[in-house]
Amino acid sequence: MNRRRTRLHCLTLLLTLNVAVAAADESNTLKLNLRFRVETAEDSGNFHTLTKQAHWNSKETAVVICDMWDKHWCRGATRRVGEMAPRMNEVVRALRNKGALIIHAPSSTMDHYKNTPQRKLALQAPKVETKIPLQGWCHLDKAREGDLPIDDSNGGCDCEPRCKGYAAWSSQIAAIEIGEGDAITDDAHAYYLMRQRGIKNVIVMGVHTNMCVLGRPFSIRQMIYQGQNVALVRDLTDTMYDPRSKPFVSHFTGTDYVVEHIERHWGPTLTSADLIGGKELRFRNDKRPHLAIVMAEQEYQTGQTLPVFARHHLGKDFRVSYVFAGTKDRNNLPGIDVLDQADIALFSVRRRTPPKKQLDAIRRFVAAGKPVVGIRTSSHAFALRGGQQPPKGHDHWPQFDAQVFGGNYHLHHGNNKPGDPPTMVWPQSGAESHPILAGVPEGEFRVVSWLYKTEPLGPKTKLLLMGRVGNRTPHEPVAWTNTHVGGGRAFYTSLGHPKDFAEERFQKLLLNGIHWAAGKIAKK
């Protein structure tokens, strides 16, 4: 009996210990959603935006706070650092409590901290010989990453007038607490300390993505060269970029472009929401709606024309994400879950039947009453020919055209052969004053897209453009608005041939349609 009690006691103790160890392991685990980019096909220039879940041991993780100075020579940069600092401090406190090493790295301010235990902690770490030498500054690696997507040659100040550069900083911003057990350094001692502690994961936050976040000895390029797992907190960073420089986009779009550059060439990113919950940080002056462009058709090459259009026309006013069809499975839409964060969607899709979970994301977007824009083949985006059924596990939406665009696509007029009469388009009488037609020249004009059969439209539509084949009848609707089944705005045009994108009329029409759907007024 005593032996049995002893065995039961040992078993109970073992189970208790296992639960305690599991709880300890759980408390030390950082559950991260790491976003990264994968090229859709070799040399395509298009990238899937994907997310994978990772579990990092917090005790094997360092948090590097890059150059969050008390003051920057640029007033705008100083203001944005001030906006980030409170949220950053919440993240730092949470990760410190989980056992992560916090490294404060306000470059060129080490004299301010020379007598602190945090500075002494960094300096005591023994030097480590590295295969790739740690440098005071790691410049652009053109063989690996090419050029940066923004021109920062003027220093990147976006103020008016531009600020004059000088060494404005003296310490880290006070809103970020420096805790017991933290370290302070601005050089290779950051890596020496990581090696001393057995740290292999690095979470980087701070400023600026196109400069210090990439180039400092404790930051992205050099930590990756040393074999560390590195992730950037993309909502707790900023860029020195002036919208008066190429590519002439919003300051915040400039940051998005550099974050995208990092995800393509260096490593993944995450958000503060992954680390402490809540919503990711958004700067007060960042008013851009988030536009998701979904492309899954081969006939009109909109996988090439739409990104070029977006880069040229939308970067000033929108935050843009792209979803491309998979190359191995034409029905797969990797990254379509971005719709859960998007404010507006533009579709250029032709006869695809995505996995049910992916189509549900689109249904969910529409049901939420969010605005939808469609071009050309999106009138038959999720419908197979002749009532065919989708493969097992996949889904279709034959009513997408009627329910979202108020359309009635039933083939085209067949004027798509050399020598056939052209499609002629003109504004519907009474629609000339509609905002979508603002700046679109009056009168009849020729387009390359052959004419779709779309008559009759739904009862909630408002017709904007009509078209015909040469001098033939009947006339067909070419562009219109609708209130979709979820209650949101919809704009559709059957135009969208590659040569249409070269025409200023079409560019203006599409730009106006996107702005109108988003509830904005297109800028001249």
Image (tube, rainbow, N blue to C red):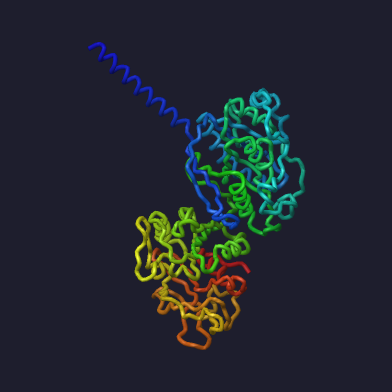
State the image quarter where residue 266 is shown: top right
Q: Is residue 430 visible?
A: no
Image: 435 above or below 260: below
Could you tell whether 479 is left or right of 237 in the image? left
Which residue does the image show at 65% across and 26% down from the upper left? 122
What is the residue that sits farthest to the left in this orientation? Answer: 1
Please state the horizontal and vertical placement of residue 435, each as a whole percent of the image: 54, 72
Q: Nearer the viewer, residue 142 or 434?
A: 142
Quadrant of the image for the N terminus?
Answer: top left
Q: Nearer the viewer, residue 42 or 132?
A: 42
Q: Nearer the viewer, residue 250 or 409?
A: 409
State the image quarter where residue 110 is shown: top right
Please state the horizontal and vertical placement of residue 517, each as a whole percent of the image: 50, 66
Quadrant of the image for the C terminus?
Answer: bottom right
Q: Nearer the viewer, residue 132 or 162?
A: 132
What is the residue that sits farthest to the top in this orientation? Answer: 2
Image: 3 above or below 103: above
Could you tell whether 371 is left or right of 228 in the image? left
Image: 307 above or below 497: above
State the image quarter where residue 318 is shown: bottom right
Q: Is residue 306 visible?
A: yes
Which residue does the image show at 49% across and 75% down from the upper left? 479
Which residue does the image show at 70% across and 43% down from the upper left? 72
